[in-house]
Amino acid sequence: MSKIEEIVEHLEKKISKVLQRQQVLKLENKKLKDALQQSQSKLAAKDLELDTWEEKYNTLKMANTILGSDNDKRETKLKINALIREIDHCISQLSS
């Protein structure tokens, strides 16, 4: 009987260690998920900031072109033409 008791005790100790390890891994997993969430939030904020700066840059580029800068003149003309076509399309829809 003592041999069986020893085996049972040994199994209980192993199970206990596995359960403890599982708890440690759960805590570590939670910390990693929190860190990931935080990193994703920071990344989203940086993406939004990048979009804002790109918009400001494009606006500044267009303003420089309108003020007489030779750089990007063609691009600005195309953008203005696209806006005019869009306005004409809206007017035609309103007229119908």
Image: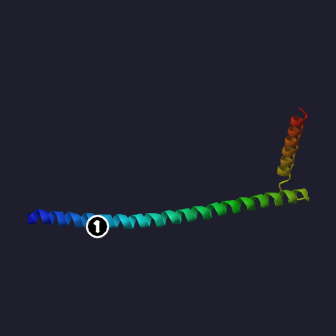
Q: Is residue 23 visible?
A: yes
Residue at image location 79% in from the left, 61% down from the top: 56
Along the viewing direction, whichever of 1 and 55 lies nearer the viewer: 1
Classify 30 as above or below 84.
below
Q: Is residue 21 left or right of residue 9?
A: right
Q: Is residue 70 visible?
A: no
Q: How far from the left and from the top, in percent, is residue 78?
A: 84, 46
Q: How far from the left and from the top, in percent, is residue 18?
A: 30, 64
Badge 1 amino acid: Lys
Residue at image location 22% in from the left, 65% down from the top: 12
Q: Quadrant of the C terminus?
A: top right
Label 1 sits on a secondary structure element that is helix
Q: Is residue 65 left or right of residue 46?
A: right
Q: How far from the left and from the top, in percent, is residue 53?
A: 74, 62
Residue at image location 10% in from the left, 64% down from the top: 3
Q: Quadrant of the N terminus?
A: bottom left
